Image (tube, rainbow, N blue to C red):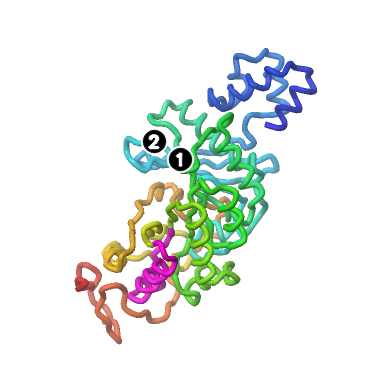
Amino acid sequence: MEKVRKSLAAAGEPAFRLRQALDAVFKNDISSWEEARTLPPALRERLNREAPVLSGLQERVLVSADGRAHKAALRLHDGALVETVLLRPKPEGDWSVCVSTQVGCAMACTFCATGLMGLRRNMSGEEISDQVLFWRGYIKARRLHGRLSNVVYMGMGEPMHNYAAVSQSLTELLDPERYGLSGRHISVSTVGLVPGIERFIEDFPTVNLALSLHAATDSVREKMVPATRAFPVAALADVLRKSLAKTGRKIFLEYVLLDGENDRIRDSFALAKFVHSVGRADLLHVNLIVWNPTATRHQATEADNARRFKVALERQGVSVTIRRNLGTDIQGACGQLITRLPPPRSAPREAARPAREPRTGERPRSHPPKNRKRPEGGGFRPLS
């Protein structure tokens, strides 16, 4: 809104015009100043020219077959493209927005499409919060049932790697004179940049924290999330303890299940051990995420194994959910956002993988049979 302030001041407008402009944007969900009928026509034209309502222009919107996921590509002032997603977790419920914080990402998570882009640039605080404004106008224009009530910082980019802009956007979202969202309806996800987490829990104790953990041992995690080698699992446990002591708020642990990589027997034990090492297992909740296909070498854990992994955690006293994926058919689900596609391949190719240890509840075998139909249930036996 700083451009709006300057434009109004330069035009010599009275002070109440700013209040009218703010109300038009944040109460009436306008997408263009032409919709702000409380402002004079000449002023609307000036504001459209000097201080557009939105910092990004809609390039395209894709809607999932079930209508519960809408993915938009927004073109920013310098031509950069970012993706943002509108989600409806419950069929008749309110909407959530997944916002991006960077154009691309430097974390290079091996299973995430955004990591294939590398980092192009950081987004500004206004560009981040404007994604919420865009979707509010979208809901209004299309008369979609339900309101926008939740915001998750889980799109393109690592929020703690662009902390200043993320902080500015959070301040705007929490401002009762602007977006007026409650902290409990906002979640910020990070791969575990500890200094950023420490600042975040001091600056925004009412906002939810989510840690993209994905593995609870350093040896496995460093392969999946190479940018976090400087922050071992023990350091993550320490900073989570600080967060719980400061805020007393539940923390969410995101865990993408990858076949033969982090879905094994020892992985469930390591994850349970990590949860209990933090000291407040009742305030830690694990979200298991079945990996969504991207142009990377991984494979998703089978549904049967995901359920057995969940049961194994529950039996060790861990609160856990298998998260429902929305928007997979429009490449809008977790880990699928990308605005520069990799070169096409002539045919799918499965990367060679080393022999793996048995997954949760699976009978170990030294030599897998060849040309043999896999038994129903993936060869698992019930956990005892």
The amino acid on which the numbered mark 1 sits, given as a three-letter code, is Asn
C-beta proximity under 8 Å, tags 1 and 2: yes
> Is residue 30 shown above or below 218?
above
- Report the disc number at residue 330: none
Query: In x, y percent, where is residue 366?
Result: 30, 87
Q: Which residues are magenta?
A: 253-280
- Horizontal side, residue 84 vs residue 162: left or right: left
The quarter of the displayed image where residue 168 is located: top right
The quarter of the displayed image where residue 95 is located: top left
Q: Residue at x 42, y 26 (%)?
A: 143
Q: Residue under label 1, please give it.
A: 150
Direction bottom: furthest residue: 366
Give the mark, 1 or 2, whose residue is nearer the N terminus: 2
Direction front: furthest residue: 245
Query: In x, y percent, where is residue 295?
Result: 49, 61
Query: In x, y percent, where is residue 69?
Result: 41, 42
Distance, label 1 to label 2, CA atoms, is 8 Å
* Element under disc 2: loop
Q: Nearer the viewer, residue 335 or 238?
A: 238
Q: Residue under label 2, please give it.
A: 94
